[in-house]
């Protein structure tokens, strides 16, 4: 469940990063601010149960990949194979970090509470 929060936070990160570049009126700025609030709220909550360094790396990696792909698909940023390869390398590292990081919730189930 906590990793789902990180993934949703990264999804909203894409919106606020794009909003910082493209917002030009009250409504788009409001959407950008709301996306920032949702994104960081979920990130902070996930960081309470998961290793913060890994959470942040996954968050930034997924947000970066999503932002690059969104810029290509929706805003006409030039497509380059080198960009795609680098995003895939980034995502491979993010997935690797997620796979080698244990969720503290699962570890705590075997422990007694103090």
Image (tube, helix red, strand yellow):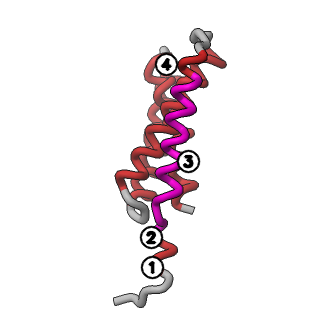
Circle 2 sits on which residue? 104
Mark 1 and mark 2 residues within 8 Å of each other at the beta carbon? yes
| Disc 4/disc 2 C-alpha distance (Å) | 38 Å
Residue in view at x 55 percent, y 47 percent: 7
Against 108, residue 47 (above or below) is above
Left or right: 80, with 30 as reference point: right
Identify the residue position indicated by label 1 in the image: 108
Q: Earlier in the sequence, mark 4 or mark 3?
A: 3
Q: Which residue is mark 3?
A: 7
Disc 3 or 1, which lies upstream in sequence?
A: 3
- Across and down, in percent, residue 56 comes to 40, 47
| Image: magenta residue range | 84-104
Question: Which of the two discs, 4 and 2, labels the residue nearer the N terminus?
Answer: 4
Return the residue nearer the eye: 36 or 24.
36
Q: Any mark on residue 23, and which?
A: 4
Q: Position of residue 21 (x, y in %)?
A: 45, 18
Position above or below: 38 against 48: above
- How far across and down, in percent of the image, does residue 47 sit? 40, 57
């Amino acid at each position: 469940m906590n990793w789902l929060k990180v993934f949703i936070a990264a999804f909203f990160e894409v919106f606020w990063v794009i909003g910082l570049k493209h917002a030009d009126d009250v409504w788009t700025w409001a959407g950008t601010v709301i996306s920032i609030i949702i994104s960081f709220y979920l990130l902070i909550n996930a960081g309470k149960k998961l290793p913060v360094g890994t959470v942040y790396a996954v968050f930034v990696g997924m947000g970066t990949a999503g932002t690059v792909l969104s810029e290509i698909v929706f805003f006409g940023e030039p497509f380059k194979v080198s960009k795609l390869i680098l995003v895939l390398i980034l995502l491979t590292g993010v997935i690797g970090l997620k796979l080698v990081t244990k969720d503290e919730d699962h570890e705590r189930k075997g422990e007694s509470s103090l």
